[in-house]
Image: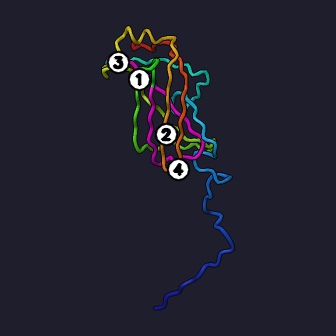
Amino acid sequence: MGLLLAGCISDGPDPMIDAGPPDGAGPCGPAPTTLTLGVGHPMEPVPDLRFQIGQGLQGGHHFDISVRVSGPMDPDSVDVQLDLFHGETRIAQHLTDDWLLHIYPEGPWCEYPRARLVLVDEEGGLLDADAVEALVGETLQLDVHLRSAGGDADGSFQIIATGIDRLR
């Protein structure tokens, strides 16, 4: 029994191999890096940065905010940190390590679908109802940090609490 070995000669790159996005951009897009805030999945941008406070099933209140990143980023392993401030006081923090961002090649961009920012007091307990009510109409500072081996993204946004979406 014989063995037949055939060799291949190539005249260049294999056209069947995906070369990735144009212009050498990664899956989240080319530089410069930009961040956009919104809601939902897929994300709907909220250009006026007005977000409702949600009421949770366990008595707390929160913001649900989605983040879109366009620019150099490794979407396979991203550390996500969002910090929400009222004045100098941090009232919410969202931390997620080693997360897989959702890739949208039509952008191209990548998204973190929902960061739940639970409102807390200075001791870390749930923010009481009167303090939550006092946030309506207030401008709050949201700092966003995404870290990956392929690049980082940082942004600071002034968001407005527009009201409370209460459970019925």
Query: Which residue is painted at 30% across and 20% down in the image?
Result: 123
Spatial separation of the CA atoms under disc 3 and disc 1: 8 Å
Magenta segment: 59-83
Q: What whole-number distance in Å separates the C-alpha atoms at marks 3 and 4?
A: 35 Å
- The span from disc 2 to disc 3 (Cα, nearest Å) is 25 Å
The first of marks 2 and 3 along the sequence is 3
Q: Earlier in the sequence, mark 4 or mark 1?
A: 1
| Number of the label disc, if any, that sits on residue 109 | none
Q: How packed is label 1: few (under 14 Cα within 10 Å), some, or many (20 or more)?
A: some
Question: Residue under circle 1?
Answer: 90
List x then y, in percent, for residue 94. 41, 31
The amino acid sitting under disc 3 is: Asp
Residue at the front extreme? 88
Where residue 97 sits, quadrant-wise, is: top left
| Residue type at the position of mark 1 | Arg
Question: In front: mark 4 or mark 1?
Answer: 1
Q: Which residue is mark 3?
A: 121
- The residue that label 2 is drawn on is 146
**The C terminus, quarter of image:** top left
Q: Amino acid at mark 2?
A: Leu
> Counting other residues with Cα less than 10 Å from the Cα at mark 4, is it few (<14), some (14-19), or many (20 or more)?
some
| Residue 88 higher or lower than 113, as above or below | above
Q: Nearer the viewer, residue 54 or 131?
A: 131
The Cα–Cα distance between marks 2 and 4, rounded to whole angstroms, is 11 Å
Q: Earlier in the sequence, mark 3 or mark 1?
A: 1
Instruction: For mark 3, give the secondary structure.
Output: loop
Whether residue 39 sits left or right of residue 55 in the image: it is right
Q: Return the residue nearer the eye: 42 or 98.
A: 98
Give the amino acid type for the residue marked by disc 4 in the picture.
Gly
Question: Could you tell me if the residues under marks 1 and 2 are in contact, i.e. CB atoms within 8 Å?
Answer: no
Q: How is the image coloured?
A: rainbow
- For label 2, the SS is strand
